[in-house]
Amino acid sequence: MLRYLPFLLILALTIYAFIDCLNTPESEVKHLPKVVWVIIILLFSIVGPVVWLFAGKDRVASGGGGRARRTQWVAPDDNPEFLKSLRDEQEKKDKDKDKD
């Protein structure tokens, strides 16, 4: 069983890089077109995914942890823009009522 571990790790790395490449917007892909990166990842099983992870994608450096921080989802009742749009909508309804 242990002898299959390197092959499984290579396969997992290739699958991860392949899916990461497919999910990356074209604007964030560096150096080569996205289709070429997919071909490189699939043809060169160890080198392709490693090169993709280090050089193929714009990675945003963040202050902590070395991972890019994604924008967090904000619930509508905590979102000031959403609350403002509700107030504006309510004011518009009130003005329409006053006209009638």
Image (cartoon, rainbow, N blue to C red):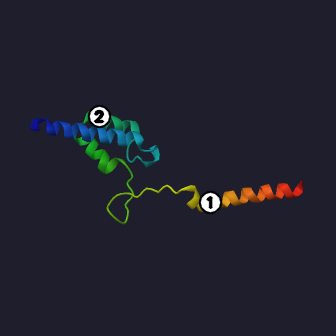
Residue in view at x 74 percent, y 57 percent: 90
Q: Residues within 10 Å of mark 1 (few under 14, many from 20)?
A: few
Nearer the camera: disc 2 or disc 1: 1
Left or right of 85, for residue 25? left
Q: Earlier in the sequence, mark 2 or mark 1?
A: 2
The residue nearer to you, when weighing 68 against 59, is 68
> Considering only vertical position in the picture, is 10 above or below 60?
above
Residue 33 makes an appearance in the image: no
The residue nearer to you, when weighing 7 against 34, is 7
Residue in view at x 27 percent, y 38 percent: 14
The residue nearer to you, when weighing 59 against 86, is 86
The disc placed on residue 42 is 2
Residue 52 makes an appearance in the image: yes
Q: Which of the image's four quarters has the N terminus?
A: top left
The disc placed on residue 81 is 1
Distance in Å between CA atoms under marks 2 and 1: 44 Å
> Considering only vertical position in the picture, is 60 above or below 28?
below
